[in-house]
Image: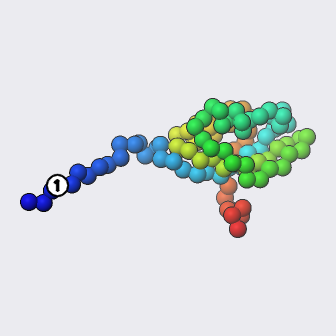
Amino acid sequence: MAAKTKKTTSTKPAKDITQKTRLWLMYPAKQITHPVIWELSQKFKVITNVRQASVTDEIGVVCLELVGPRSEITSAIKWLEKKGVKVEPVEINVLES
């Protein structure tokens, strides 16, 4: 008689699957001097990776990559928006070429 094999399935909810997201962040002048990305990395279970940045006295633009559970990334985006940072997805992946 053949031994039965036990099938294992993940009980991890789909929303907590690790993902990678690239975002454009546009900082208003009042947020430029605050360590927003550092605060985000301390507050949420995500890995941050600055892919590109340009900062002047009037505005800061950052291409930020976030890696982590989907629920944490979603919460981090909402938190950024509450801080006054405009968040948009990166549409074209020109940084990897």
Residue at x 85% of width, y 43% of height: 59
Q: Position of residue 22 (x, y in %)?
A: 65, 52
Single out the residue that lies furthest toward the left.
1
Residue at x 43% of width, y 46% of height: 14
In the foreground, 26 or 17: 17
| Label 1: few (<14), some (14–19) or many (≥20) C-alpha neighbours in 10 Å | few
Question: Image quadrant for the C terminus?
Answer: bottom right
In the foreground, 1 or 58: 1
Q: Along the horizontal axis of the image, is 32 left or right of 90?
A: right
In the foreground, 85 or 54: 54
- For disc 1, the marked residue is 4
Q: Position of residue 23 (x, y in %)?
A: 68, 49
Q: Is residue 51 visible?
A: yes
Q: Position of residue 66 (x, y in %)?
A: 63, 47
State how many labels appear.
Answer: 1
Q: Position of residue 13 (x, y in %)?
A: 41, 42
Q: Where is 80 relative to 48, above or below? A: above
Residue at x 77% of width, y 53% of height: 52
Q: Where is 73 relative to 90, above or below? A: above
The way the protein has been coloured in the rendering is: rainbow
Question: Image quadrant for the N terminus?
Answer: bottom left
Amino acid residing under circle 1: Lys
Residue at x 77% of width, y 44% of height: 26
